[in-house]
Image (cartoon, rainbow, N blue to C red):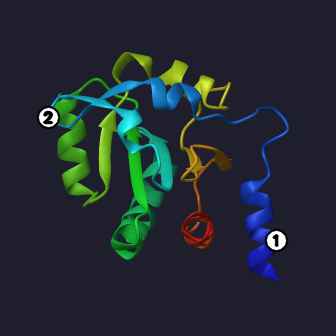
Amino acid sequence: MRLLALLACLVAAPAWAQASATALFAATLHDFEDKPFAFEQLRGKPLIVNFWARWCGPCRKEIPELTAAHDKYAKKGLVVVGIALDDKIEATKDFAKAYEMRYTGLLAKDGGIALMQASGNPKAVVPFTLLIDRKGNVVGSKLGAMTHAEIEAGARQLLGSR
């Protein structure tokens, strides 16, 4: 029962915004080697997409939980993606290594704010997380750090949807 209530909170679109993955799938980001990464190549996969920044305290707290979800569910097809709002590749790469981020790390560089706004976060605050199903639909979003229970519920929801 508690899990259902938690899922309802996570899945319900916030009243102030409608989350959409359209801009995200159209975006070309950069990996930690500064190579272009077309987000479109992730279409068809269940995704947990987390916008974060090195200076964000709540982001730092949720990184180990996102790593744990990646470790637990990657073999089942779930892809966890962290999109850093940063243009300093080496610093972000070092940060990701120090925090043992084993999931897909990308940099939004200069377009991160606009990408978050287009994805349903008009205030462009981090952390911001989207749950995107295999059909490319946003089925949940959260502004603020996600708890272990919310990440687990989201992963199970995404993996259960075909």
Residue under the image location 63 percent in, 71 percent down = 153
**Image x and y of residue 100, in percent:** 25, 61
Query: In the displayed image of the protein, which residue is found farthest to the bottom?
Result: 1
- Three-letter residue code for mark 1: Ala
Q: Is residue 17 left or right of residue 142?
A: right
Q: Secondary structure at mark 2?
A: loop
Q: Secondary structure at mark 1?
A: helix
- In this rendering, does residue 141 appear at all? no
**Image x and y of residue 74, in percent:** 36, 67
Q: CA distance from mark 2 to mark 1?
A: 41 Å
- Three-letter residue code for mark 2: Glu
Residue under the image location 62 percent in, 65 percent down = 161
**Image x and y of residue 149, in percent:** 61, 73
Quarter holding the N terminus is bottom right
Label 2–label 1 contact, CB within 8 A = no
Task: Name above or below for residue 95 compared with residue 62.
Answer: above
Q: Is residue 119 left or right of residue 72?
A: right
Residue 33 circle label: 2
Badge 1: residue crowd in 10 Å (few <14, some 14–19, many ≥20): few
Residue 5 circle label: 1
Indicate the quadrant where residue 73 lies: bottom left
Badge 2: residue crowd in 10 Å (few <14, some 14–19, many ≥20): few
Task: Name above or below for residue 51 compared with residue 7.
Answer: above
| Mark sitting earlier along the chain (2/1) | 1
Residue 83 circle label: none
Task: Name above or below for residue 31 compared with residue 49.
Answer: above
